[in-house]
Amino acid sequence: MITTLKEEIKIKEVGIKEYLNNNGIDITENYFIYNKSIDKKEAISQVILMVNLHKILLGYRGNCLTRIGSSIGKEVESYKVQVKRLQKDYDKIIETGMKNNLDKLIISDGKRILQQATEVIDYIYNHNYFGIIERSMNREEICIGRADQGNLTNKPNIQIGSIKYVSYNLVEEDLYKYIKRLQRKNCKIDEEELIKTFIYESHLSNDSFFYLKGLNSYPKDSLRIWERYRANKKSKTEEEFLMQFKKSIEYESKKFI
């Protein structure tokens, strides 16, 4: 199991803050205001900035460390549990019948979404996933957790709004989370171009290219909304869930594998 490979080390803020400050990076403790309509050029520039920050973070060897349970690999592992759980829900709707319009949408698109998710999981595991994890652990790679324009800028120097989510993780995860943010905002981007830019600037192998293509083909938001609808954790109305589900299905229907 991935979780037995190594404990993840979460960085204590005091240690990493001092390291970043010593490398000319300011922590403002406030998120940045920016134009949400991000174009292709701006997205590529942000990816390069992200990579430059990763290179600086690779030099960090802090003493102020607190051990926590590993999160490396847990997201992909959770995908398998998620698919199995929602497959049962899909089968239940088939058996008991549709109660509302959202159930109708789940019956209409759910099977395809679950199949897409399963294909992605298989694809990731078949393209040296464990090798990527081993590389990340050997290099002690650090992710900022949120690398979009609202938390990372270089005006006038590199600045980070919050280091709340900084932790040891695969560097690819920062790019993946950034792309998902752009998709949710309906930004006109070329995901594959951003992936290629990240791989080239980071000097990573084709394994990372395949991994990122896989991640970005997983219908994460659609399945998450489906789960939240069943749990109704945020007490949204059926119409609100329906609108969110339709939107996510639209931008996650595109596959890169």
Image (spheres, grey):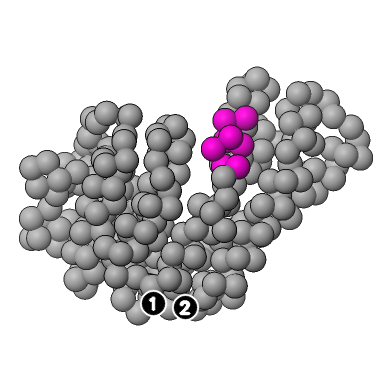
| Three-letter residue code for mark 1 | Arg
The part of the image, by quadrant, that contains residue 93 is: top right
Residue toward you, 246 or 99: 246
Q: Is residue 140 left or right of residue 216?
A: left
- Region rendered in magenta: 246-253
Q: Nearer the viewer, residue 224 or 247?
A: 247
Give the x, y percent position of residue 201.
26, 63
Mark yes or no: residue 59 visible: yes
> Can you tell which mark lies on residue 131?
2
- Circles 2 and 1 in contact, beta carbons < 8 Å: yes
Mark drawn on residue 182: none
- Specify the quadrant that holds the N terminus: bottom right
Q: Position of residue 185 (x, y in %)?
A: 42, 32
Q: Secondary structure at mark 1?
A: helix
The front one of 105 and 205 is 205
Lateral position of residue 20 relative to residue 232, left or right: left
Is residue 228 placed above or below 179 in the rendered structure? above
156 shown above or below 243: below
Kindly identify the amino acid type of the residue bearing the numbered disc 2. Answer: Gly
Q: Is residue 249 magenta?
A: yes
Magenta: main secondary structure equals helix
- The disc at residue 135 is 1
Task: Report x, y in % for residue 7.
Answer: 44, 73
